Structures are given as C-alpha cells and as structure tokens.
Image (spheres, grey):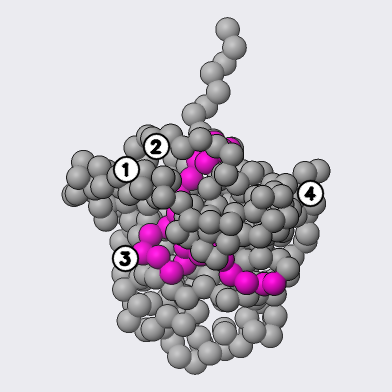
Amino acid sequence: MADNLDYYAILQVNRNATLDEIERSFERLSRTYDPETSRKPRAAQRHAEVKEAFEVLSDPDKRRDYDRDLRSGEREVAGAVLPSDVLSNRLVLATAGALIASVIGILVVIIVIGGGDGGDDLVANPTTPAVTPTPAPTLPAQSPGVPDDNPPDVTGTENLLESGLVYIDFAPGAGEVAQTGDSVAVNYTGWLQDTGERFDSSISRDSTYGLTIGAGGVIQGWDEGLPGLAEGGTRRLIIPAELAYGEAGRPGGTPPIPPNATLIFDIILVDILTKAPAAEASP
C-alpha cells in the first residue's frame, strides 16, 4: 500500500461514502482509465491507482485500518478528507448540446445580475465586469458530499508569496501541473479565518467549479494561488483581504463576507480541462 496516495481522492468519493458509491465510482473510473481504450496521459498509472484504492476501500478491515492511519497522522495524506480525484466525465451533458449551453448561459447572467445568493459568485472577482462567457468544456459531474463546517487541521510546508498569500500543499497531486491560462475544474470549501465559519463550498453540488487561471474571473488570491498545483492535489490558500474582498467585504453574500476578512480555501484540482495556448515563437 503506497503511503502517499489518498484513496478517497483517487476514487472521487467522500470519507463517509457507502460501499455502493465506492463500487459505482470504481466501475466508472476503471472505464475512464482503461489502458486499452483511454487516451488520457498516464492512463495505466491512474488505472492501477484506482484499482489499488478500490481494493482498500471496498474491504471493511483494510478501510478501517486506512482510516485509523489517516486520523492518527501516520500517513502523509492525513489532512485530505475531500474528493480530489483528477477523473472527469465529459460525456455527461454532451447529448444535451446547444440546449444545455443556452440554459447555462442564462443562469450565469441571472446569477451575475442578481448576486448575493451565495454559491459560485462568492469566489468571483468583485472588480471584474461581467462578460458573456465563451463556451467551455463540460465540467466533471460528482456525487454531492458534505463539506467541513470548520477548516480541518492540515500538515505541510507554509509557502509565503510576496503578495502576502500563503499556500500549503497538504495532499500533493500526481497529475499534470496547472499553469496560468489553463481552464480547470476544482472543488473548494471556503471559511472565514477569524471565526472558522464556512461561507461557501462546491462539495455539496452535483458538479465541480470551473475557471480559467489568471483570467480575472475569480478573486486575486485564487489566480495567484492555483498555478503549480497538480491534478489530484489539494492546496490550502490563506488569502489576505487585499487579495479577496478588501475593505468593503461582500455584504450581499450568504453568509456575507465582512470587511477586511482573511479567507481560508481548501482547493482540490479535479482536472485540467484545457491547457493554455502555447506562446507563439518570435519571428
């Protein structure tokens, strides 16, 4: 059993997942990463990891021992309790075609105009004007889970950037590394540092959250903090107010973000949907 693998993340299930959920996820991911048919990078490696994770989590005794090691901190992934597998199902909405794209576009406009209803708009950049989004790859679907009410304890090296942003990779990924300009699918949970109160999470939804790193569509702390995170990895961002909602806060959120609030986000890079276009060579 490899000590640095997060089996729950690999199977894209929660720590409280039932055996049926584990089995369904294993069957789906086995097909996705079948070395005989998959064109995904490192399909054989991912397929082996999925099989190893299933062998542990489907066996009550092995799962109990694995969970005990996580709680005791004997495994490097002890802090990782959220689904972070790099697997995706891009065919889920493909048959809906233009109809789904139209509905999503309408919903995005309603959310942007209405604001203050919680959800994805709580991570949106408050200073960037809303624009009509260009068509994006289908986001991976997921089984809704239960996010942590308070930030869980994590272990890892704290990295301080010049901007004041702190990040901790407490569950390193094994996939491709995200860079500025990549379109990615993530899962996240956000808390207020002062109170520990959770104010937003994508874990409880039936789809991951998509963004393009560095495009200004999210708060600055995300654009600065996501490059360098590998697929399947979980990174904690501790974002000072000036890289989030500043002196004004987010009074219309549900719950609201107070002025000068430092935010904590645990972000799981589920998949890199599209890579940034390669820079053209100078003539």
Real-space Cα separation, disc 2 to disc 3, in angstroms: 30 Å
For mark 1, what is the residue? Answer: 105
Instruction: Please give the range of residues in magenta.
Output: 195-217
For mark 2, what is the residue? Answer: 133
For mark 3, what is the residue? Answer: 28
Real-space Cα separation, disc 4 to disc 2, in angstroms: 30 Å
Q: Residue at x 36, y 43 (%)?
A: 109
Mark number, residue 164: 4
- 237 horizontally vs 217: left or right: right
Residue at disc 1, secondary structure: helix
Residue at disc 2, secondary structure: loop
Q: Residue at x 34, y 37 (%)?
A: 135
Would you call the spot at circle 4 few (<14 residues within 10 Å), some (14-19), or many (20 or more)? some
Looking at the image, is mark 4 or mark 1 nearer the viewer?
A: 1
At label 2, which amino acid type do we have? Pro
Real-space Cα separation, disc 4 to disc 1, in angstroms: 35 Å
Specify which label sits upstream in the sequence, 2 or 3: 3
- 162 horizontally vs 201: left or right: right
Specify which label sits upstream in the sequence, 4 or 3: 3
The percent coordinates of residue 44 (x first, y second) are 43, 57
At label 1, which amino acid type do we have? Gly
At label 3, which amino acid type do we have? Arg
Q: Look at the image and say whether residue 88 sits in the magenta stretch.
A: no
